[in-house]
Image: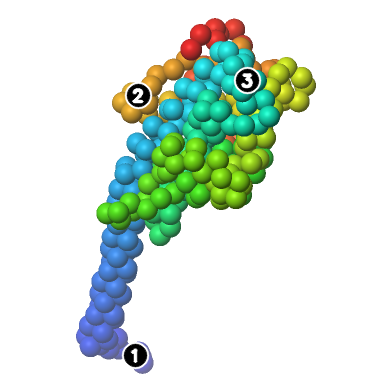
Amino acid sequence: MCYVSHVETPWLQTLLAAALGGLTVKLLDIAWAAYIRRSEASASAKKIVARHLDPILKAADELVGKLCSLARKDFTGVVTRANVDRELGVDFGNILYLFAQFWCRIEILRKESVYVEIGRDATGDKLRDFFACLESTGVRVVDRAYQRGIGEALITERGTGGFDCMSFHDFMEALGKPDATVKQWTHPLTAILWMACRGRSATNMQERQRVLLYGVVIHALIDTLDPEHETASHRPSYPNKLSKKTRKELQFRVFKTYLPFVKATEKYTDARRPSVV
């Protein structure tokens, strides 16, 4: 009876073992390198978000405080006979500045994180979602290009390196110069705020609701990213100053589509809540 005997080839087994062992080592090296890159990217994102979060929260807090005050007074007392011809008084200029300062802080973060994915940090990921919401068609106060242009116009360079925001004094001086870049960029915002503060016509009320809705989103940003209010003030909202249309926009688009992680949204939309600020 004929048969073929099994011939052992230890050299082949050794070669296969070496090849598989080398492949395993290579795959482990690749996986380790990818892990290191992800860890470094997450650490970079966490570091830059931590550096910029407080300035953004402080600017947001000042803006929300002013908008709450305006809502409580139904936007009266800002436009007076002294500036009825659109001579910008200090009070009106301050409102402009608080919007511009907030946008400036956002643009500084963008400049300094151009090579960093802030979404790799949990707080940075939420911050990015808030920025997207604030620039969306139904929420933004001015066109996205103007918002960014205004923010960039206020950026100054520190003598020690890095960026800072223009002071209120310098901002008001710039507004007094007809050909100043700041004045040109802020023109659309000036027009909207002027209409919001002028009276109670349908157009006035429409612009007022637009500003108030924007303020609610910034208020939610503060409550979400500074829940213990270590940096920003703890404030009630102004829901009974919002129209039914604005409240629906917040409930069914803003908080469900853009910001589903925001908790206790009834704080901002419940019309039965008092407006005391």
Q: CA distance from mark 1 to mark 3?
A: 108 Å
Which of these two is toward me, 187 or 204?
187
First reached walking from the N terminus: tag 3 or tag 2: 3
Q: Which residue bears the numbered disc 2?
A: 229
Tag nearer the camera, 2 or 1:
2
Q: Is residue 106 above or below residue 113?
A: above
The quadrant of the rendering that contains the N terminus is: bottom left
- Counting from the top left corner in percent of width and height, residue 266 is at 54, 17
Q: Note whether residue 250 is visible.
A: no
Q: Is residue 266 above or below residue 195?
A: above
Residue at the extreme bottom: 2
Q: CA distance from mark 2 to mark 1?
A: 83 Å
Residue pictured at 56% horizontal, 28% vertical: 89
Q: CA distance from mark 3 to mark 2?
A: 35 Å
Residue pictured at 44% horizontal, 27% vertical: 62
In what element is the residue under mark 1?
Answer: loop
- Counting from the top left corner in percent of width and height, residue 120 is at 39, 49
Residue at the extreme right: 202
Crowding at dot 1, Cα within 10 Å, few <14 / some 14-19 / many 20+, comes out as few
17 to the left or right of 73 = left
Q: Which residue bears the numbered disc 1?
A: 4
Residue type at mark 2: give it: His
Residue type at mark 1: give it: Val
Which of these two is toward me, 66 or 198?
198
Please report contact status of discs 3 and 2: CB closer than 8 Å, yes or no.
Answer: no
Residue type at mark 3: give it: Thr
In what element is the residue under mark 3?
Answer: loop
Q: Which residue bears the numbered disc 3?
A: 80
First reached walking from the N terminus: tag 2 or tag 1: 1
Please report contact status of discs 2 and 1: CB closer than 8 Å, yes or no.
Answer: no
First reached walking from the N terminus: tag 1 or tag 3: 1
